[in-house]
Amino acid sequence: MALYIGSLLLVLGATAYLMAAGIANRITAIALMFLASAALGFLLIETLDYRLGLAAGIAGLSATALGMAHIRRYGAATAVNAAVTGWLGAALGLFAGSRFYVTNAVMIGADIAFVALAFLLQKAAERYSREAAEPGKQTQPAKQTEPGKQTQPGKPANRRKEAARKAKRASSAVPASAMYAAAVAVLASVLLSHADSSNADRIGQASSADAVYDLDNGVQTATVEVNGAGFNPRNINLRSDVMVRLVFHVSSLAADDMTFVSKDLNLEAPLRKGDNIFMIKKALPGVYGFTVRGSNASGTFTVKAAS
């Protein structure tokens, strides 16, 4: 659990540091929001044991808060666009995270990818700042006035025109931001609707495995990991002439109200966090299904006849 919390704090801390240091321009600021929100979405869906609604809510609020933090530096329009881009990144992160079976290696890999991309983004921002500050790219000095003539201060009419142009740009940005937000909302809805598919294989989730046979004790042991993503592996191959020891290891991140159900084995029992052990004297050849009540997760035992 410490790894998952630490991963989230790493993303938030690095993002806050880059924002406080000052991003070079609006584009890199918005790119940072996309990257940070995608990382948060990916990590949250796995930290919260694939509770999509809760993870989406937290990711959306985080993206909004991080995006609106740019309002003082870049203005309201850029802050809104940054927040909306954060929503898009969060949706993509949630969808991508739901495709992986949660392991420590996956979480560490996500941390490394975020740090590497954030570093590249920072370097790109620094390069932009250096190029903008080069002497050859500075504007030419203003022409000197003739002796006896003084430069005239800016006319009020010119200032009013400039203010009018800024107001026009700000007003035109409102419908554009609204259309952008609507498009992102539609795309995010599509992504999230396909994220919660518990009956689909996830990356890192084994489709099948053989039980471990203990020759001395005459027992075969089948160990199955259980969490919000389902069972890992999804199928266990057993022998029909050997006693079976079933071990269902429930993740510490999983919900507290899981119930194992197998109509084929005529077995129903609550699952507690940690190891849950069931003993079966002998099983006839065939395929036996099992599931967790109230979920789409399913698995099978395939009992093969002794040769």
Image (tube, grey):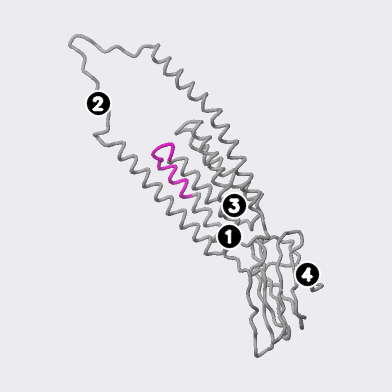
Residue occupied by mark 1: 100
The image shows residue 153 at horizontal and vertical percentages of 32, 13
| Residue 16 forms part of the magenta stretch | yes
Q: Residues within 10 Å of mark 3 (few under 14, many from 20)?
A: many
The image shows residue 208 at horizontal and vertical percentages of 63, 72
Front-lying residue, 306 or 146: 306
The image shows residue 131 at horizontal and vertical percentages of 30, 39
Q: Give the residues in magenta.
A: 13-27
Q: Residues within 10 Å of mark 2 (few under 14, many from 20)?
A: few
Q: Could you tell me how far apart the alpha carbons at marks 4 and 3 are, in whole angstroms?
A: 30 Å
Q: Secondary structure at mark 3?
A: helix
Q: Quadrant of residue 148?
A: top left
Q: Secondary structure at mark 4?
A: strand
Residue occupied by mark 3: 95
Q: Is residue 291 left or right of residue 66?
A: right
Q: Is residue 77 left or right of residue 144?
A: right
Mark before the other along the chain sequence, 4 or 2: 2
Question: Quick one: quadrant of the N terminus?
Answer: bottom right
Residue occupied by mark 2: 140
Residue occupied by mark 4: 262
The image shows residue 237 at horizontal and vertical percentages of 67, 77
